[in-house]
Amino acid sequence: MRKTGALPSQMIRQLVENENITDADEVNVMPGSLDLSITGEVYRVNGAFLPSFNETVYQAVKRVGGLKLQGEKVTLEKGVCYVLRLNERIRNFPSGVYAYCNPKSSSGRVDVHVRLLVDKLSRYDAVENGYTGHMWLLVVPKTFPVIVSPGLSLNQMRFFNQDTRFDELELEMNFNGLLYDSDGMPIGYKDVRHSDGDGSILLSLGLRFGENPGFEAIEGAEPIDLTLKGHYDPKYYFRKVSVFGNSITLKSGNFYILSTKEYVSVPPCLACEMVPMDERSGDLRSHYAGFIDPGWGMTQQISGFGRTLTLEVRSFDNGIIITDGQPIAKIRYERMQSNPELHYDEKAPTYGNQVGPKLGKHFSEWK
């Protein structure tokens, strides 16, 4: 067993049992992360912010004019900032342990931006070793209004005792079995056409997935209740993108659901995160939900595949034309401290059968 790395499910569960994290539900323990859940304490605020070094989040909410909202279910308007208190509370991690957060995939797929806030730290999505206190979320629905209620999970927390992300040499030495093409053939390290040389892998846009090359959001739709699954007709919220030749055009400010061309596999001994692309690749953002649990794509890998990654994409240039096979996303692998007791594909996951662009779990199948 390795002594350093990202903490697996059994160690996360131990953090909960030891009350290093209080009020966490063990049902929310994932192979390499913990789903966090919101309370009914919700504030509408005038804009995004960070607390100062001597300020609690609650004090910062008051400073920026926070208005407390009432009701079991609360509608969050498009383009408005909200602060929601989480159920879970940190009571000092063990020595050397720290945490980062990412939005859950289902939050990203409906274009809801989610960032963690903690007291006296002017950084998003981080919990430093030694912290004790409440945690909060800064939430901004970008395309659709959404309905939230207590117990809903919008983000997930990952725990580490050391940075064990691959450098370029480690990536090359461990590359076998990480990527596959659509025919189930392994993609080797030297087969990857583009690289930033920093231990990351650049993934490319895939547009050849039958009748669904991708989806573009339709603004002005009715609110989405994020507690419902398979409930909404996707055609009221999205339209299919049009492919011209081998390319699509992204309109400035619009939100898209696309897919990687490559099929990605994450062995149980590793975790994976989608990280920001270099701005030289174009003025667009290709994801909002970043963490990929250990064991992703391992069931399909028995057939030689892995699984594609769904991308949440927004363009900031007017009329960006992107082509099938063009670099559009970036991932980094890191070592787990030990293998999780149960990996992602063994948990009957929500997105366990996705191939190509996949809308969020709130929608019924596209027909």
Image (cartoon, helix red, strand yellow):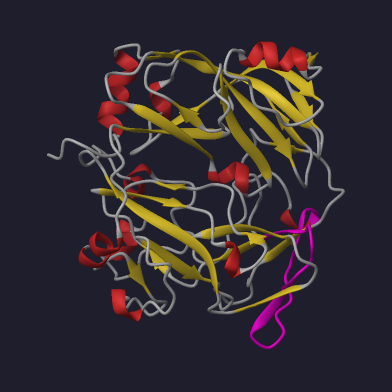
User: Is 1 situated above or below 290?
Assistant: above
Residue drawn where x is 28% and y is 32% of the image = 161
Residue 30 picture location, percent across and down: 38, 35
Q: Nearer the viewer, residue 86 or 54?
A: 54
Q: Is residue 249 magenta?
A: yes
Residue 336 picture location, percent across and down: 26, 43
Q: Which residues are magenta?
A: 236-256
- Residue 139 lies left or right of residue 170; in this view the side is right
Q: Residue 186 occupies which quadrant of the picture?
A: bottom left
Residue 356 picture location, percent across and down: 53, 67
User: Is 335 situated above or below 58?
Assistant: below
Residue 355 in view here = yes
Residue drawn where x is 56% and y is 31% of the image = 123
Q: Classify the position of the N terminus by image quarter.
A: top left
Q: Nearer the viewer, residue 338 or 237?
A: 338
Residue drawn where x is 82% and y is 26% of the image = 46
Q: Is residue 200 magenta?
A: no
